[in-house]
Amino acid sequence: ETLPMVAVDPGLLERSVANVVENAVKYSPPGAPVLVSASSIADRVEVRVVDRGPGVPDDAKERIFAPFQRYGDAPRGAGVGLGLAVARGFAEAMGGTLNAEDTPGGGLTMVLTLRVAADELVHPVVPEPERQAT
């Protein structure tokens, strides 16, 4: 499936997705894959990151996005609880959302929703000039 262009800051998008994927890997059982998919829905693109970890109860789904929050038995070396807060903040800065849903069969699915770029907002990517090694 070809996805439409989205109106995002590439650096913020990269960090948001990386934070969500890193979180999914931390909480997934050893050897369990983390699945990442993207699809177009109306004027939005959804990026879904699916893990098979312990999941999060409904009453804690919003709390996991608060700074310095780690839910349940965080794995050793799991960080200080900023990853999802930063990811959501970046998503919102780009006009999108980041939410948590239950994964059917167990686990957590993070849904990053981004708006499709209007034609006038799409700009070609201009490569950075090459730097000389010194």
Image (tube, rainbow, N blue to C red):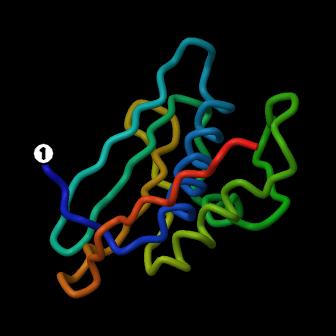
- Residue 52 spot, x, y in % from top left: 51, 29
- Point 52% across, 70% down: residue: 91
- Residue 17 spot, x, y in % from top left: 52, 51
The number of numbered discs placed on residues in the rendered structure image is 1
Callout 1 secondary element = loop
Which quarter of the figure is the C terminus placed in? top right
Could you say which is closer to the camera, residue 70 or residue 47?
A: 47
From the viewer's perspective, tell me whether residue 123 is left or right of residue 133. left
Q: Amino acid at mark 1?
A: Glu
- Residue sitting farthest toward the top: 31
Residue bearing mark 1: 1
Q: Is residue 24 above or below residue 126?
A: above
Could you say which is closer to the camera, residue 3 or residue 55?
A: 3
- Residue 58 spot, x, y in % from top left: 57, 57
- Point 56% across, 64% down: residue: 12
Could you say which is closer to the camera, residue 7 or residue 55?
A: 7
Q: Quadrant of residue 78?
A: top right
- Residue 60 spot, x, y in % from top left: 67, 59
Which quarter of the figure is the N terminus placed in? top left
- Point 62% across, 14% down: residue: 30
Could you say which is closer to the camera, residue 69 or residue 84?
A: 84
- Point 80% across, 30% down: residue: 75
From the viewer's perspective, tell me whether residue 99 is left or right of residue 126. right
Q: Is residue 127 above or below residue 73?
A: below
Label 1: few (<14), some or many (≥20) within 10 Å?
Answer: few
Q: Quadrant of residue 90?
A: bottom right
- Residue sitting farthest toward the bottom: 120
